[in-house]
Amino acid sequence: MKKTYILTPKEKEFIEDWLKVVEGEMERLEFFKKWSTKKDDASFLDDYYRVKEGEMTIEEFREKWTSKGAWKKYITVMKHRLRRKHENSKKILQQIKEELSLLNTFFKLREIP
């Protein structure tokens, strides 16, 4: 796997998957099934289908997924992490530019220690 410098491999995969949704290469349901919160190794969508098929009662479903937005907590966490990195990227980019300028100045000198 290619090394990433800002994003973790998981964050990069999250963004690439969403771009696939936007470009029509992946269904939204596939994305939400992959990235939604998992409880007992089952996603919200898995349990929804289990209720439809009669394998799980609606009461069991409600007990498991009661808190508001519980099914998308992981997605919310990923968006927050990405937003924070995006906001910090301007500072990081400025520091990189300053350090590159310093390095360039150093290596243009006639005399290097």
Image (spheres, rainbow, N blue to C red):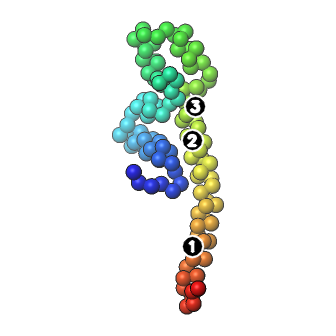
Looking at the rendered structure, the secondary structure element under dot 2 is helix
Is 57 placed above or below 10 here? above
Q: Nearer the viewer, mark 2 or mark 1?
A: 1
**Label 2 or label 1, whichever comes before in sequence order:** 2
**Can residue 82 be seen from the camera position used here?**
yes
**Label 3 or label 1, whichever comes before in sequence order:** 3
Q: What residue type is labelled 3?
A: Lys
Looking at the rendered structure, the secondary structure element under dot 3 is helix
| Residue at (46% x, 18% y) in the render | 48
Q: Which amino acid does label 2 sit on?
A: Lys
Looking at the rendered structure, the secondary structure element under dot 1 is helix
Coordinates of residue 38 in the picture (x, y in percent): 51, 27
Residue marked by disc 1: 100
* Picture quadrant of residue 59: top right
Q: Residue furthest front?
A: 113
Residue marked by disc 3: 73
Q: Which residue lies furthest to the bottom in this view?
A: 110
Residue marked by disc 2: 79
